[in-house]
Image (spheres, rainbow, N blue to C red):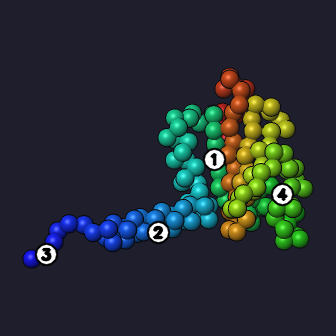
Amino acid sequence: MQNSAITNKEIILALMVVLATALISLTVIISTPAGMQFYGDTLIRLAGSESHEAGFYASSKEDFSEIYSLNDSSGNFIASFEESFGTDNKKENFFFIFYDIRDPDNICIRTKYGINRYADLIYMNRRCICSSPDLCCKEW
C-alpha cells in the first residue's frame, strides 16, 4: 500500500526547484537587453503610468555607445559613460552601477541609468518629476 502523504523531502525538493527557476529567470532578466526591456515595460504598465510620465529603454553597451557617441576606445564603458554623462547620484551594488541624472534641457525630467557590471546591458528609465505633464516630453 502506497502512502499518499507528502514528505518533508518532497516539499524541500519542490522548494529547491522553485528557487532554481526563480534564479534562472532573474539571471535572464538582468543580463539581457530583451529581458530587461520586458521587465521595465511590465513594471511601468502595471504601475498605471502614462506614456508621458515614464519611459524605459534597455540596450547593449555597444549599441548605447553608438547611439550616444561615447568614446569607448579604452574598452572601459563605465569610464566613458562617466566622462560623457557625469556621476550624479552614483550608487553601486553587486550587479549594477546606477546614476540618477537630471536632463540638462528640461529640469522636470530625470533619467536613471543602470549599467550591468557583468553583462552587456545598460538601461535608461526616464521619468517626469513635475506635476504638469505639459512640462515633460510627450514622447520618449
C-alpha span from label 1 to label 2:
28 Å
Q: Residue furthest left?
A: 1
Residue 112 horizontal/vertical position (percent): 72, 46
Amino acid carrying label 3: it is Gln
C-alpha span from label 4 to label 2:
34 Å
* Residue wearing tag 3: 2
Q: Is any part of residue 114 visible from this angle?
A: yes
Residue 14 horizontal/vertical position (percent): 36, 67
Amino acid carrying label 4: it is Phe
* Residue wearing tag 2: 20
Instruction: Decide: is 95 above or below 74.
Output: above
C-alpha span from label 2 to label 3:
29 Å
Residue depicted at x 80% and y 31%: 107
Query: Which label lies toward us, 2 or 3?
Result: 3
C-alpha span from label 4 to label 1:
18 Å
Q: Nearer the viewer, residue 74 or 87?
A: 87
Neighbor class of circle 2 (other Cα within 10 Å; few <14, some 14-19, many 20+) is few
**Based on the displayed image, in which of its 4 quarters is residue 44 positioned?**
top right
Residue depicted at x 59% and y 36%: 51
Q: Quadrant of the N terminus?
A: bottom left
* Residue wearing tag 1: 56
* Residue wearing tag 4: 81
C-alpha span from label 1 to label 3:
54 Å
**In this rendering, position of residue 49 left or right of residue 101:** left
Query: Which label lies toward us, 1 or 2?
Result: 2
Mark 1–mark 3 CB contact (< 8 Å): no
Q: Residue furthest bottom?
A: 1
Whichever of callouts 1 and 3 sits on the residue coming sooner in the sequence is 3
Neighbor class of circle 1 (other Cα within 10 Å; few <14, some 14-19, many 20+) is many
Label 2: state its secondary structure.
helix
